[in-house]
Image: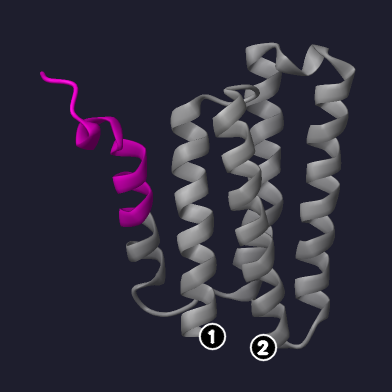
């Protein structure tokens, strides 16, 4: 099979399909969006642990800080009124998309395909939240 740019972008296409299916009926409940905002950095900790990337204390500290930050955004989203909570969740999702980009460029902690997939889910999900809110 030839190595075309389109075949290498399978994580992007898979991510867009997931967002389309998730948001086809509108914005999911805020509690679900906030829970995913916490689950995303937990996945990074799991990947990092299995890949041995968290042996470095600095890397572990950065990942734990990410978990704390995204957890705080999730808590803030749930504490705010419903409309503002969606905007806070969208901001958190977008910020996690930036987090994914940093990981994609470094190639550390998680596989590049994962950070590409997750980044596309996060940024397109954030846009869908804002548009549909």
**Residue drawn at point x = 33 percent, y = 64 percent:** 20
Compared with 125, 44 (above or below) is above
* Residues at circles 1 and 2 in contact by the CB criterion of under 8 Å: yes
Residue of label 1:
133
**Residue drawn at point x = 77 percent, y = 74 percent:** 78
Q: Residues within 10 Å of mark 2 (few under 14, many from 20)?
A: few
- Comparing 23 with 101, the one in front is 101
Which comes sooner in the sequence, label 1 or label 2? Answer: 2
**Residue 34 position in % (x across, y down):** 68, 64
Q: Residues within 10 Å of mark 1 (few under 14, many from 20)?
A: some
Q: Is residue 13 left or right of residue 93?
A: left
Quarter of the figure with the N terminus: top left
- Quarter-wise, where is residue 117 in the image? top left
Q: Which residues are magenta?
A: 1-17
- Quarter-wise, where is residue 110 in the image? top right
**SS assignment at label 2:** helix
Q: Is residue 129 left or right of residue 40?
A: left
Residue of label 2:
83
- Quarter-wise, where is residue 55 in the image? top right
């Amino acid at each position: 099979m030839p190595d075309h740019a389109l075949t290498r972008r399978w994580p992007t296409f898979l991510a867009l399909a997931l967002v389309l299916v998730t948001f086809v009926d509108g914005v999911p409940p805020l509690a679900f969006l906030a829970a995913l905002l916490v689950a995303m950095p937990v996945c990074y900790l799991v990947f990092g642990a299995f890949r041995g990337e968290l042996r470095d204390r600095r890397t572990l500290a950065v990942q734990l800080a990410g978990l704390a930050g995204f957890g705080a955004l999730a808590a803030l989203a749930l504490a705010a009124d419903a409309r503002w909570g969606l905007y806070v969740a969208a901001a958190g999702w977008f910020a996690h998309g930036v987090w994914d980009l940093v990981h994609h460029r470094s190639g550390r902690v998680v596989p590049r395909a994962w950070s590409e997939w997750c980044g596309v889910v996060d940024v397109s999900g954030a846009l869908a939240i804002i548009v549909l809110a």
